[in-house]
Image (cartoon, rainbow, N blue to C red):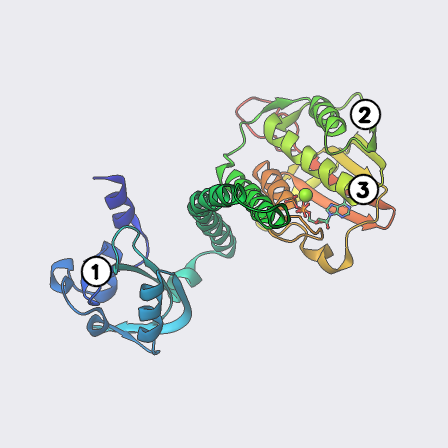
Amino acid sequence: MSAENAIWASLPVPAFMIDAGDRIVDVNSAAEGFLNLSRKAVLGQPVWDQLAIDAPIEPAFERARAQGTPLFVNDIDVGSGNRAPLQCAIQIAPLIGSPGVMMMLLSPRELAGRMTQSHSVKSAAQSAIGMAEMLAHEIKNPLAGITGAAQLLSMNLAAEDLELTDLIVAESRRIVKLLEQVEQFGNLSVPDFKPVNIHDVLDRARRSALLGFGAHMKIIEDYDPSLPLAYGDPDQLLQVVLNLLKNASEAAPGGGTIRLHTYFEHSFRLRRNDGSGHSLPLQVEVIDDGPGLPEEIRADIFDPFVSGRENGTGLGLALVSKIISDHDGWIAVDSVPGRTVFRLSLPRVPKQSGEKESN
Ligand SMILES: Nc1ncnc2c1ncn2[C@@H]1O[C@H](COP(=O)(O)OP(=O)(O)OP(=O)(O)O)[C@@H](O)[C@H]1O
Ligand SMILES: [Mg+2]
């Protein structure tokens, strides 16, 4: 089975392929189940005869096809000749490379409702990331074309018009940078856990900050030399500290002081809803004396695309929080003007290898 066929067959929601004449050219097995009809029985059938949709969706569908754009419709009742309607979200997208052919996915609410909360939140985040990644990939090519065209144009322009092509090039670069960050998010793999000297990670981050984005800052080390090894992925933890240093540096363009503080707190435990818990005794604080978190976004800073800066993408702290949660760790922030503290709490190396610490 080719990868495309496997993806099609594995889609856990009813999926339809619809040709330019609104006839069904393919359905996956979830759709067979939804319609309670075999694939053979529905191929070639007009799709709107098979699906009873309780909303005038056809004009929007036509528009999506004509414009080659996707269409999302939430909370509409979809039934078939053989079953009572279910409340669904519908996603429709033109099939790349086949003009006029549209792909339609139905996500029945009932299915989503049965999943546990955390699972659906996580998978929602994952599908959003997957979608963003796909989008990032698709936007980069035309963008390269636009930049190239602007550069060609600029060769024949008078000096005063060059400003415009320069703007196109600069803004395109900015979008590419954003897309790369989105892709980095998607590429994040599970942590490669090993014993990590957190002070080595902090030193690396500090040195690279002072050479680049944090050259205007003073970075003080305030380490507990007896701190045991942490258990984590050193590269991912470096990314975390770099992002925190970068934010602190960007919050204080005129310069300031950042303190890297480590300490051991034996009693720090993370409790889960199910009553299980684990110990997170290693504390790493990144403390700055800048203006503090902007009031309007304070509650949402860990969400993607939340930024208080003119040119910020808002992905830094979302990435930080993803990495820390993949480490079974904890991140907290406390901020007033003049003192902002991001505190990471991390697990230590399990006592017996291959087994997680339980006390
Ligand atoms: N140490 C800090 N002091 C003041 N504000 C901060 C600090 N850290 C984060 N913030 C605020 O939180 C926002 C979100 O940070 P985040 O790193 O997620 O995104 P960003 O820095 O705007 O963009 P990106 O990191 O993707 O370049 C920032 O825009 C800034 O307003
Ligand atoms: Mg940032």
Mark nearer the N terminus (3 vs 1) = 1
Residue 25 placement: quadrant? bottom left
- Marks 2/1 in contact by CB < 8 Å: the verdict is no
User: Could you tell whether 8 is left or right of 208 in the image?
Assistant: left
Disc 2 on helix, strand or loop? loop
Residue 290 placement: quadrant? top right
Residue type at the position of mark 2: Asp
> Is 198 placed above or below 143 here?
above
Farthest-out residue, right: 338
Q: Would you call the spot at circle 1 few (<14 residues within 10 Å), some (14-19), or many (20 or more)?
A: some
Residue type at the position of mark 3: Pro
Quick one: quadrant of the N terminus?
Answer: top left
Which residue is painted at 57% across and 30% down in the image?
A: 356
Where is residue 232 drawn, in percent x and y? Answer: 60, 29
Residue 276 in sight from this viewpoint: no
Mark nearer the N terminus (2 vs 1) = 1
Disc 1 on helix, strand or loop? helix
> Is 107 placed above or below 134 here?
below
Residue type at the position of mark 1: Glu
Q: Which mark is residue 253?
A: 3
Residue 28 placement: quadrant? bottom left
